[in-house]
Amino acid sequence: MFFAGINSLAYSQVTGATDTLKNDTVKVTKHAENLSGQYDVGDLFHKILHPKAKPDSVKKKPSGITIIPNIASNPTIGSQIGIKAVAGRVLGNEPGTFLSVAATSASITTKGIIYFYVNHNIFTPGNKYNFQGSLVVAKTVSPDYGMGIGNGNYDSPENEILTNPARKGRALNSLYFNLREKVYKEIQKGLFVGAGASFDVRRNIEERNTTATDLTPYRIYNDRYGFDDGGYSANGLLFNVQYTTRDNQNRAYKGIYADAGFRLNQTWLGSSRGALQFTTDVRKYISLSTSHPEHVIAFWNWGSYLLSGAVPYLELAGTGRDGSFRSGRGYVNQYFKGTKYNYSEVEYRFPILKNKFISGVTFFNLQTANDDLGTKLFEKWQPGYGGGLRVLFNKATRTNLCLDYAWGKYGARGFFLGLNEAF
């Protein structure tokens, strides 16, 4: 299985509407990172276009904007071409103001998939307010491998269809629209409280190569929980608390990031069903060297737990359903999913070249979920592991191009391409 496409690429940059960053006030303002010894793609292009140019006597400040082609290929989406841009800038002149980031991408594939998004994570001067949001318009395909974590015990043919991930995956075609916006206010240094709303709408959902009488995981779930096969809306209010001490959002060397919040899907907002979900996102970064801080051990845990009500099948928590859609390397998005889901990952990041142009990573992850057969959260786990290379695209914002190969269970494996670290 080879995949590096719409689900991992469409959100694989500084997207995470839930991501924030903190510049260490003392060390950043007094000892700014030395970029003179680093080499990025901009330097490479300059060398190619101006091979005889002499080094400037006065160094120009590197640009905070990165523009690259958005190219991918996999059996689900076909071949993809498009363009992607990521920007980062500190607003205002107040010391300690966090980096603001924005990203956009437009792409089309040979299988007729069209994807466009814009997202932002903006900190006002002094971090008084933080605005996080995204807009997505897409004609897309969502691979489907059933529900649950693959416990191997099936008490009926219907439940075997619903929960056996070893079955050949189906594809759900749909029109997808998402509008999300949250506003955070800093109440103490690094501590924010926020609220907002999210509107997730799918229309014209279609399972190809099936008949009206075929039993599929999607149809079984909809019948059990009262959702229309043709489309749904999952519209809700968001309430979050987050704390961060990360030194950089795109590629942290040290610090912690923690976010916890509730999502309340409301029928009066147009949601097909009411629901209450609780989510957590915790990340810790430990630099192993003062002289080479790029040697980093990073830890990540993400969880989503349905407390009441019901959410649509394609909105279930699962593989790749975190805020930046990067979890679960080794599997396609939502390979495992449930009403309750927890994900953990550890990654070692290390430089390869002295000028930091090429670096590498190795990683290992575990997923667990419940299902409709009585399997409880944390009862069964599924692993994924792999490694990859990093190409420094923009040294001013620590923007990396990420090329990873990962393996999972049931023959799942693939190549994953993204901009910026998975977490």
Image (cartoon, rainbow, N blue to C red):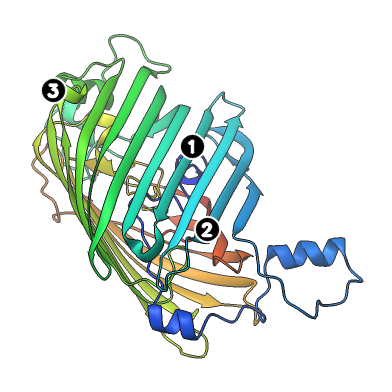
Q: Looking at the picture, how far across and down is residue 250, in whole percent?
A: 47, 63
Label 2 environment density (alpha carbons within 10 Å; few <14, some 14–19, many ≥20):
many
* Disc on the earlier residue, 2 or 3: 2
Q: In the figure, 39 relative to 406: above or below? A: below
* Amino acid at circle 1: Tyr
Residue at 13% x, 51% y: name it.
377
Residue 247 quadrant: bottom left
Residue 193's x, y, as percent? Answer: 21, 56
Outermost residue to the right: 52
| Foreground disc of the pair 2, 1 | 2
Q: Label 1: which residue?
A: 117
Residue under label 2, please give it.
88
Q: Where is mark 3, residue-wise?
A: 224
Q: Position of residue 349 (x, y in %)?
A: 47, 73
Q: Position of residue 232 (x, y in %)?
A: 27, 21
| Image-quadrant location for residue 270 | top left
Along the line of sight, the residue nearer the viewer: 273 or 229: 273
- Name above or below for residue 78 compared with residue 375: above
Three-letter code for the amino acid on which mark 2 is drawn: Gly
C-alpha span from label 3 to label 1: 33 Å
Q: Is residue 99 left or right of residue 73?
A: left
Q: At 51% across and 47% down in the image, what residue appears?
A: 103
